Image (cartoon, rainbow, N blue to C red):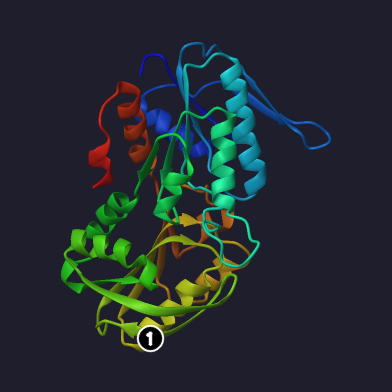
Amino acid sequence: MEHTKIFSGTSNIPLTEAVCKYLDVLPGKAEIRRFSDGEIFAEISESVRGSHVFVIQSTCPPVNEHIMELLIITDALKRASARAITAVIPYYGYARQDRKVQPRAPISAKLVADIIVKAGINRVITVDLHAGQIQGFFDVPVDHLYAAPVFISHLKKKFNKDEIVVVSPDAGGLERAGEYAKRLDAKLAVTYKRRTGPNEAKISHVIGEVRGKTVVIVDDMVDTAGTAIQAAQALAREGAKHVTLCCTHGVFSGNAPQKIENSVLEEVIITDTIPPREEIKRSKKIKVLSIAELLGEAIRRIAAGESISTLFT
């Protein structure tokens, strides 16, 4: 890890510390503060000349604030003569705006990618993008990691494979659910979801046998939790014995944590791509797994010029 430095924006300080502990390095020294009018200022407090710098920053709520932090930190590092700058974005905000869904609408995921590259980023590492094609929105290399190994290791310890059925909440997530089912040697099912508006959906059918089984719903994120709770209710009606939800990104907007506490979901398993709020940490139903080792190993291999392809499997 010689000539490699790891910095953090304000969105992922605990995760950055865990990554640095895995790599046995100290976090980079930087000061991020705001002027009285809300402008962001970043000062790099150590030399980065000739170094490969990794900046860990999820663009999670407040999304625009964290994007601006990433841009300003990147500009500061570039002007401090860093050799290369890799943005480690565990959660990529605006990812759901990846296509035009109506006339005269923006493709904001592409716009944000262009801005990040323009700031001076040479490479991007991210985890479980909402849509895989977002990798092509960046004009620099993108390493798209998956949290599946973290979840699968936990599920194998927790459940007997013979009792698990992996469920996709919609047809779009079947590929992800199929990979989980394959790795767990489990059966596969899907719920039929119809979108009725932004952050609104109706689930009417379950395709697959779930009666008497432990059901694991897999998705990339849980936001309002409406879809997950509806899916859990539909699966319970079909006779599922236990219902667990695995989601990489725990957004939990609005009163989602309270809705989960009052739902038929027995457990919601997320990762720390988005730092959990205090109410999430206190929840008896929500469990947080760390992706620090996954990110740390990717950073180590990239810094050493080694292949990271085995991390994708």
Q: Residue furthest right?
A: 37
Q: Residue 285 at x, y = what percent?
A: 45, 65
User: Is residue 93 in view from this perspective?
Assistant: no
View extreme (front): residue: 103
Residue 22, quarter of the rendered image:
top left
Residue shown at the point (57%, 21%) measured from the top left: 77
Q: Can see residue 279?
A: yes
Location of mark 1 (residue): 205
How packed mark 1 is, by other alpha carbons closer than 10 Å (few <14, some 14-19, many 20 or more), is: some
Residue in front for this viewpoint, 271 or 145: 145
Q: Secondary structure at mark 1?
A: strand
Viewer-proximal residue among 107 and 266: 107
Q: Examine the rendered structure and indicate whether residue 142 appears above or below residue 227.
A: above
Amino acid bearing label 1: His
Q: Position of residue 251 (x, y in %)?
A: 54, 57
Q: Position of residue 31 (x, y in %)?
A: 64, 24
Q: Camera-side residue: 99 or 274?
A: 99
Query: Horizontal and vertical percent for residue 311?
Result: 27, 41
Q: Left or right? Give the position of 310 relative to 22.
A: left
32 sits left or right of 139 in the view: right
Placement of the N terminus among the 4 image quadrants: top left
Image check: 20 left or right of 58? Answer: left
Q: Is residue 174 left or right of residue 253?
A: left
Instruction: Name the image quarter holding residue 196.
Output: bottom right
Q: Residue at x 46, y 60 (%)?
A: 221
- Number of numbered discs on residues: 1
